[in-house]
Image (cartoon, rainbow, N blue to C red):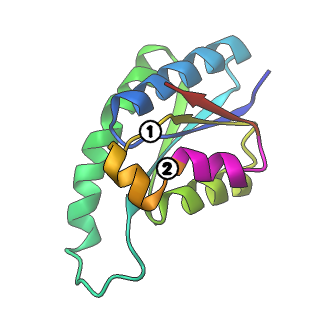
Amino acid sequence: MYSKIMVAVDGSENSMRAVEQAAMLAEASGPECLVRLLSVIAIDVYSDMVYDPLEAHGDAQLEKIRPAIELCAKRGVHAEAFLLHGRPAEEIVRVAEDGRADLLVIGSRGLNALQELAIGSVSHKVIKHATCPVLVVK
């Protein structure tokens, strides 16, 4: 079925449901299937703000991805975690392409309604630009 499944993880309930679906698909695909968990620290490249060191943001992001790692381990699914910085949709699509993912799994939204209206949904951008199949989980 699948050999490489990539999951975008942001700590939201929907992203954890995406991890659960990816783990189930990985189990069904067999022990050779690899799940790649990707978390992106969003950085606005147009901002004049000086950011705290990425390490501080990285620690918080690692805490968001830890439950996803634990869920995969409980199910006996081989998983790797990646922590990147940049524009989430662009990084998710780039890593899926570079890693030759068979499937990209993403939660339906990690933003509130006002944020989605102002800057758009990461999942919508990923669906539009990804070259592999995308499973959006609610």
> Residue sitting at 48 percent across and 55 percent down?
120
The percent coordinates of residue 102 (x first, y second) are: 76, 37
Q: Which residue is mark 2?
A: 121
> Residue sitting at 38 percent across and 63 percent down?
42
* Element on which disc 1 rests: loop
* 83 relative to 90 in the view: left or right: left
The percent coordinates of residue 98 (x first, y second) are: 71, 57
* Element on which disc 2 rests: loop
- Residue flagged by tag 1: what amino acid is it? Arg
**Disc 1 versus disc 2: distance between alpha carbons?**
7 Å
Instruction: Confirm or deny contact between disc 1 and disc 2 (CB under 8 A).
Output: yes
Q: Which residues are magenta?
A: 123-132
Does residue 94 lie above or below 69 as drawn?
below
Does residue 49 lie above or below 40 as drawn?
below
Q: Quick one: 136 or 105, which is closer to the camera?
A: 136
Does residue 73 lie above or below 88 as drawn?
above
* 110 relative to 38 in the view: left or right: left
Q: Residues within 10 Å of mark 1 (few under 14, many from 20)?
A: many
Q: Which residue is mark 1?
A: 109
The percent coordinates of residue 22 (x first, y second) are: 57, 24
- Residue flagged by tag 2: what amino acid is it? Ser
Q: Which of the two discs, 1 and 2, labels the residue nearer the N terminus?
A: 1
Q: Which quadrant would the N terminus be assigned to in this image?
A: top right
Q: Main secondary structure of the magenta part?
A: helix
